[in-house]
Each structure stands twice: as structure tokens, then as C-alpha cells.
Amino acid sequence: MARSKYELVDEALRYLEDNSDITFTQPGSVARALVEAVVNAAYDVLVEAENLRDQSFLPTAYGEYLDRFGEWLGVPRLSATPAVVVAEDRVIRFYVTEGTLYSKLGGDGSGGYIPKGTRIYNSSGDIVFTVTEDAHFDRAATEVYVSAACNVEGATGNVGKGVLTQHSLGVGGVFVTNEQAITSGTEGESDGDYRIRLALAFRAVGGSRQAIGLALSRIPGVSDYFVREQARGAGTFDVVLIPSTSRVSELVKDTVAAILDSVAAVGVSIGVREPEYVPISMAVRLIFDPNSDEAGHAAVRVDVERTIIDYIANIPVGGWLIIDQLIARVLGSYPVLQDIKIDELIIDSRPQLVRDYKLPEDGIFVIDSNIPFKVN
């Protein structure tokens, strides 16, 4: 507001003095008291009118008024969502270091399972995930991945790699960990973020890039996307989803396809697909400092494997596997190592020369489930 309440009072009193016989307007006078009462009431009305004016424009609206813009545009505010992982993403793993899961947990003649409802949590117990469906394993299995969801909504369940290490099975010798960071939990959308999406909605035309970007904002399990135009001829394009973990689940693809169908322009065909997954595995030999404690070597081997897998998981679509960079990452993380040798590099199920490797344009690495990593 251009003028304060006190300025309005002074202006009103000067008007009285200049245009009436009232000249005594000092504090405590009847004239001042009446003017202040009228100005106070009028000022409140002016403030409310100015607020309502501001709420009628997207750049200055906030709270429930932004929600009204969203209702009008058919773009509701995004609510908080819990962090969720699915088994096929290979994030939360139950495993044993001796024997098999069956020998520890039992089961029927063919195998056993991690039951739905099993709790997984961090060392302090303040972040809790719950297994959302039975995870079956055969008699020879030493590991199994599970689907799970955080018990609370929001970013609370977003945790770094290796944070979830406890479980409620009550069985010794069975371990759990999250082999990748979990980042799918989202807070309720802030006014600032919501305002940006609403601005996009004003400009979005069916099938346009703005419409696609708006539709794909904050899809759990998708970290990014890119568009391949004329993928199947004129009037078609494919949206390639980049997973936030290891793979895009079928549930996510179906959800995205349904959303994109709602924004497709007439005559436009939108396809939804994953990147080209390139399986990779390695045989790695660690050379320890001869003065290091051999009792800790086994744990280092496990950690090195995770470090390598984490490095591979962060190579972008169409990026490079750089061998020297990978070796430097490992050696820089583990002072007990003198050197690391990559004895075998297997990409797309075929042995390769141990050298830098360029992914295809739409390709990302995934860990080969048929050829296990070897870290000796």
C-alpha cells in the first residue's frame, strides 16, 4: 500500500483544518479520535481489497488462492508422497554371508520368502520402511530384493546408500541394506514450485513440450526424460524415461503413458519407453597394503563392489565408462588398497577389452543379473 495508516490520518486531519471550522486536532481531541476510528476501519478494508487484488494474479497469489488457480486449470497441487522402492529396482536387499536364506529363514520344499509387513529401518530406528509384498526366494538363494515403502509421507524416507541396515525378522545371520540412495519421497508442493507448474499450464498446448513437462513433473521413479521426435513417423514421438534407481518399473511406465495420453494433441501419437539397458559386470582384483589387517579385507571387498556399482549407476544416458576414473574413485575411498586390477570387463554379456566404453545414445548401464560381480 502506498500510504500508511498514520499518513492517512494526517491527511484527513489537514483536510478538516483546511475545509471546516475544526482546528483543534491535537492528540486527545474529539476530532482526532473520530478521524482515527474512521481511518482504522477504512484501512482494514483497503488492506483486504489490496490482498484480494494480489490473489487474482498468479505471480502474487499464494496458499488457497493458488489452489483455486489449480482448480480452474485442472492442475491440482501435488501432495506429499512416501519414499517407495520396488523389487525390480534392486535397491533394498536381504542377504546372507554364510549359507542360504532358506537355511536361516526356512520355507517349503521349493524355497521361502521375506513376508509382507517386515520392517526395515536405520540404526537409530527413526526411519522405517515396510515390505509391501512377499518376496520369494528359492532354496539356493543368498539374496533377495524386496518392495517397500516408508511409513511416513514426505522426504523423511529419502536416505543415502547403506542407511537401512536393520530388520524385524528376528533371525541372526540375515542382513539387509539399501544398495542405492532412495529419493522417491516428496514433500507437499510449495507455493513457489506450484506457481511454476501453473505458469506452464497457462502456456501448455496439447502435445507440446510444455504440456509434456507439466505432465511428467515429479513422477516417482523417474529422474528425467528426453523426447525422440518422429520416432515412428510424422506425428509421433517417444518419451524416454530415465529411472531414478536402476530400471523404470512397468507400473511407472503405465502411469506415465496414461498421463501423456491426456495431454496428447489430436493426431499425435506419444510412445513411452525406457532407455536401452546395457548389462555390465566385472571381475576385480584388489591388492591390499601388506601391513593392513586381513580381518577387515572381506568387508572392504563388499564395500568396493558397492562403490563400483554406485559409480556405474551414476553414468548418464549415452555417457562414458572411464576406467581410470573408476579406479581412482576406489583407491581414493580405501587407503588399505595399494592397487586395483580389472581382470575382466563384460558388457552386454560379452567380454571386452578393459578400456573406456561409450554407451549408445539412449543407453544406460545396469548390473548384469546373470553374471555376478567378482571382487577378490
Image (cartoon, grey):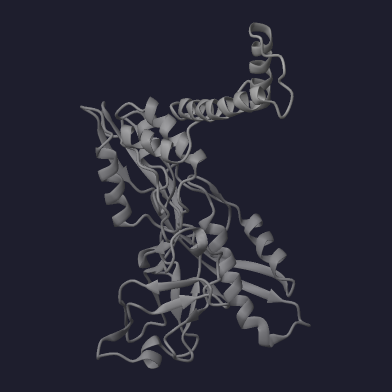
- Front residue of this view, candidates 306 and 87: 87
Image quadrant where one finds the C terminus: bottom right
**At which x and y percent is residue 75?**
34, 38
Farthest residue toward the top?
19
x and y percentages locating residue 375 in the rendered image? 56, 74
Up the image or down, 265 lies above or below 78; here it is: above
Query: In which quadrant of the rendered view does residue 28 lie?
Result: top right
Identify the residue at horizontal 64%, vertical 7% (top origin): 19
> In which quadrant will I find the N terminus?
top right
Q: Is residue 128 left or right of residue 255?
A: right
Q: Position of residue 119 (x, y in %)?
A: 42, 78
- Picture coordinates of residue 130 (x, y %)? 40, 73
State whether residue 362 appears in this view: yes
Residue at the extreme right of the image, as rendered: 291
Residue pictured at 29% horizontal, 56% vertical: 251
Residue plotted at (65% across, 22% down)? 31
Q: Nearer the viewer, residue 61 or 216?
A: 61
Q: Quadrant of residue 5?
A: top right
Q: In this rendering, does residue 181 appear at all?
A: no
Q: Which one is in front, 260 or 322? A: 260
Q: Nearer the viewer, residue 297 or 44?
A: 44
